[in-house]
Amino acid sequence: DENEKIVGLVTSWTLYKLIADILGCLALVYLLFRYTKRVVVGAESDSLKKGLLGLAVLLLGPVLSVMLLVLILPGIVSFFFYGVLLILAAFMSKLLLGRFLLRWWYGRNNKTYILDWKAAIIGPIVMLLLFLIPVFGWFVGFLFFLLALGSLTTEMFSWISGPEKTTSSRNAEPNKAKRAVSKSSRISTGKKR
């Protein structure tokens, strides 16, 4: 009877957590799409660097927060920020896993996949299944978490340091100029006729 209660509690907690993970991932995809996409796509570029940065943040974050507790308020704020960062990284890691699987799936037919609701559903389900596999599954889940944490930290620091021109925005400006020139030349040739 006691064992059945424990199994029931674990099952219901797992189900609630899965639903919360899916809802959290959907919220990130639909409410913060541009930022979430940058974090998830950014985790794929220079993965080793992002993973090591995630490990450094995971280990050094609490140490830095304890040191800042001397000043009281900055210490409390840094603990809060660290907690929010870990929660966001947990959701992002599931999106990253979902996107990784969907990119592989779509890539088999030479199609591209960016990010949408499918990653927000598949990611949490596969992550849950991974955590049921001892050691190997935990290790893979932890790697995705570190990647997400490193990419999230990189994006947050770039957001704090201010907007910089990305390569895509730099490339967009010459294209705009070319389109304007070609449009004006079409208009001028049309007037001559």
Image: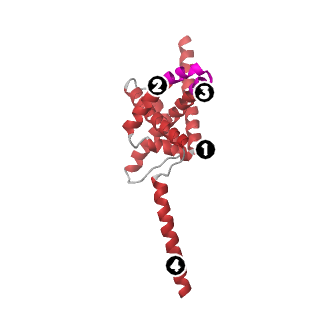
Which residue is identified by label 2? 60
Q: Residue at x 48, y 69 (%)?
A: 178
Determine the residue located farthest toward the top in the rendered image: 2
Q: Which numbered disc, 1 or 3, marks the residue closer to the eye?
A: 3
Q: Is residue 134 magenta?
A: no
Which residue is identified by label 3? 77
Given the image, on which type of amino acid does mark 2 rest? Answer: Leu
Query: Which numbered dot is residue 31?
Result: 1
Given the image, on which type of amino acid does mark 1 rest? Answer: Leu
Percent x, y for residue 189? 51, 83
Residue 13 as seen in the image, left or right of residue 97: right
Tag 4 near tag 1, CB within 8 Å: no
Given the image, on which type of amino acid does mark 3 rest? Answer: Val
* In-front residue for pair 50/65: 65
Q: How many marks?
A: 4
Percent x, y for residue 39? 49, 42
Give the alpha-carbon distance from disc 1 to disc 3, as whole Å: 25 Å
Given the image, on which type of amino acid does mark 4 rest? Answer: Arg
Give the alpha-carbon distance from disc 3 to disc 2, as whole Å: 15 Å
Give the alpha-carbon distance from disc 2 to disc 1, as whole Å: 30 Å
Sequence order check: which comes first, mark 4 or mark 3? 3
Tell me: residue 129, above or below residue 27. above
Main secondary-structure element of the magenta-colored stretch: helix
Which residue is identified by label 4? 186
Residue 83 as seen in the image, left or right of residue 138: right
Give the alpha-carbon distance from disc 4 to disc 2, as whole Å: 60 Å
Give the alpha-carbon distance from disc 4 to disc 1, as whole Å: 41 Å
Q: Which numbered disc, 2 or 1, marks the residue closer to the eye?
A: 2
What is the magenta range? 62-80
Tag 3 near tag 2, CB within 8 Å: no
